[in-house]
Image (tube, rainbow, N blue to C red):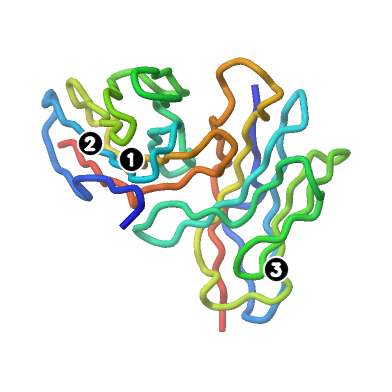
Amino acid sequence: AQSVTQLGSHVSVSEGALVLLRCNYSSSVPPYLFWYVQYPNQGLQLLLKYTSAATLVKGINGFEAEFKKSETSFHLTKPSAHMSDAAEYFCAVSPTPNAGGTSYGKLTFGQGTILTVHP
Amino acid sequence: DAGITQSPRYKITETGRQVTLMCHQTWSHSYMFWYRQDLGHGLRLIYYSAAADITDKGEVPDGYVVSRSKTENFPLTLESATRSQTSVYFCASSELAGPQHFGDGTRLSIL
């Protein structure tokens, strides 16, 4: 079974500072990995995804994440935080098509990290 | 406009009542999903569907029923609502190799 752990339920940064949101996964084979963002009273929006191509993945709004197989991590970073980045962020894992079975496409989410940005 | 819509956005009902949450997508995506979001649990998969007339259980299916007679619709029914089913429910859709697209959610309160 796959699982995701997001370290830190709340992260607070100053505007202009580095954003680092941590995600570690557990999977018997390398999975697909995703970061989603959720603004208040809205659904989740995809920030970026890793699907076994380049290990450094660039997403929208200046975010990027690096897949590190040896560390089973997929941390999300942004060099300079903006006030509009304040939201809840979710890391998620999915089996790959090669995994077989009927579980492909099903996402398992971490518990989320609320990012606060101070002026 | 293309997208995924959920209705109602807000619903209050009483224990024991049947309630149906609707989900409609205009992309003709094969896959559709229902999640619930609760504090401390993130999003948990209730049911999913790989195509019309094909559905399967997720992590927390007890007390829920789904159907998918048409590709674009994926209703979720609580046959006899309980207070533990108070939550925010999200529907999502995707193609086989694509990311999931989420609706704006239904906030359900069961009194």
Residue that appears at 22% across and 50% down? B9
Going by the numbered disc 3, the residue's amino acid type is Lys
For the residues labelled 1 and 3, the Cα–Cα distance comes to 30 Å
What is the chain identity of the residue bearing mark 1?
A: B
Which part of the image, by quadrant, shows the C terminus of chain A? bottom right
- Judged from this view, the residue extending furthest toward the bottom is A119
- Residue with the mark numbered 3: A78
Element assignment for label 2:
strand
Residue B21: which numbered mark, if any?
A: 2
Residue that appears at 68% across and 38% down? A32
Mark 1 in CB contact with mark 2 (< 8 angstroms)? yes
In this picture, residue B82 sits left or right of residue A115: left
In this picture, residue A63 sits left or right of residue A43: right
**The one of A117 and B100 positioned closer to us in this rendering:** B100
In this picture, residue B77 sits left or right of residue A110: left
Residue B89: which numbered mark, if any?
A: 1
Element assignment for label 1:
strand
